[in-house]
Image: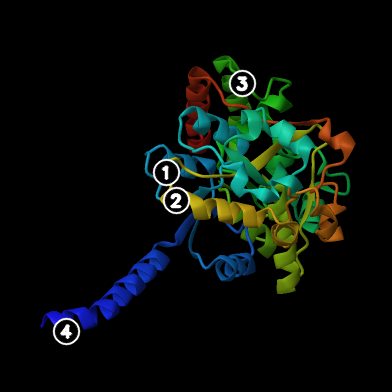
Amino acid sequence: MVRLKRLLAPFIAATLFTGALQAQAEQRTLRVYNWFDYITPQTLTDFQKDSGVKLIYDIFDTNEALEAKLLTGNSGYDVVVPSNVFLAKQIEAGVFQPLDRSKLPNWQHLDPALMKLIEANDPGNKFAVPYMYGTVLIGFNPDKVKAVLGDNAPVDSWDLIFKEENIAKLKQCGVALLDSPSEILPLALQYLGLDPNSGKPDDYKKAEALLLKIRPHITYFHSSKYMADIANGDICVAVGYSGSFSQAANRARDAKNGVVVDMRLPKEGAPIWFDMLAIPKNAADPEDAHTFINYLLRPEVIAPISDFVGYPNPNKDATDKVAPAIRNNPNLYPTAEAMTKLYTLKPLSRDAERARTRAWTRIKSGT
């Protein structure tokens, strides 16, 4: 029996070693939480082949939804994609772990000028890497808007939305706004000549009054539904994310449904935002999280994603690899002149945040 045990020992050890390797392989599962329709399926497939890491990939459509998970202290994800203004609050709350630059050699491809802008929300660029950036602007169906407002419809101005005589007419073909107080209320503040990052509760009452005035003419608030609806011709105007209208235009063309989707960056200006790749403090697999982020920093990987989602990326070495229709579109890649009118959003004080939340609740309900 002793001899038998000795003979079997190498086989038992090999079996245990193989089992350990299998268990280790099974543990290499990366959980990613990203925005709706914000990456190519091929990118995810290629990463899994390249790294051997299994991906569990979930989606959300508002910063508020992501933040609710992060602030529980156990999001269940290894990589998340908050927008820069939310990132700043979340860094302060201690929900992320610092990045290890030694594991991100492709950091060298990032545009230093854009990284400097992001430092307003992430000092020293310690906690996050920019993924995509864009603006909040106006998407529209040219034919339907022209039929309602004529040839001189102010599609390049926030007057299209905030002047009641315009939106009241557009109601008949459908108007959608983002379900996002952190992005819609700053637009109203700016339109009123107020600071879009105002910390004054009284300013939010003024913005609320403006939005309540046009509220009866708004079809709905949603942060992803408008993409399909404008592509299908179910609505004619939406306030949404720049790249989403590029995607909607592609969907309409592919469907050959006769719908045209266009967009304009309003001449008065708009918020510019950055969606950031970050690793939660309690991530189960920070090693593979760095691997995934570094993979997305490859110019040849990120450029096709920009083509797919219609957003510019912050990778300076990828720009010439992005499709000309996107990189040469001033509504997607803002001109130097337009950049002077764009503004970043900042975290609010608690009092201002409460005022904004209360205002949004009343706006949504229409009371």
- For marks 4 and 1, give the one nearer the viewer: 4
Q: Secondary structure at mark 1?
A: helix
Residue on which the image places disc 2: 77
* Residue 158 in view here: no
Please state which of residues 143 and 194 is positioned toward the viewer in this rendering: 194
Query: The residue tagged with tag 4: helix, strand or loop?
Result: helix
- Disc 3 element: helix
The reply to whether dot 2 and dot 4 touch (C-beta < 8 Å) is no
Q: Secondary structure at mark 2?
A: loop
Q: Earlier in the sequence, mark 3 or mark 4?
A: 4
Residue located at (83% from left, 44% from top) = 153
Count the labels in the image. 4
- 263 lies above or below 349: below
- Report which residue position mark 1 lands on: 69
- Mark 4 or mark 1: name the one nearer the start of the chain: 4
Q: Position of residue 6 (x, y in %)?
A: 20, 79
Distance (Cα) linking label 4 and label 1: 55 Å
Is residue 154 positioned above or below 200 on the image? below
Could you tell me the amino acid type at mark 2?
Tyr
Q: Are marks 2 and 1 in contact (CB under 8 Å)?
A: yes
Please give the residue where the numbered disc 4 appears in the rendered image: 4
Spatial distance from mark 3 to mark 1, Cα to Cα?
31 Å
Density class for disc 4 (Cα within 10 Å; few <14, some 14-19, many ≥20) is few
Q: Quadrant of residue 110?
A: top right
Question: In this rendering, which labeled residue sits more in front, label 3 or label 2?
Answer: 2
Q: Are marks 4 and 1 in contact (CB under 8 Å)?
A: no
Query: Label 3: which residue?
Result: 206
Determine contact: label 3, label 1, CB under 8 Å.
no
Q: Earlier in the sequence, mark 2 or mark 4?
A: 4
Quadrant, the N terminus: bottom left
First-in-chain label (3 vs 1) = 1
Depth-wise, is mark 3 or mark 4 nearer the camera? 4
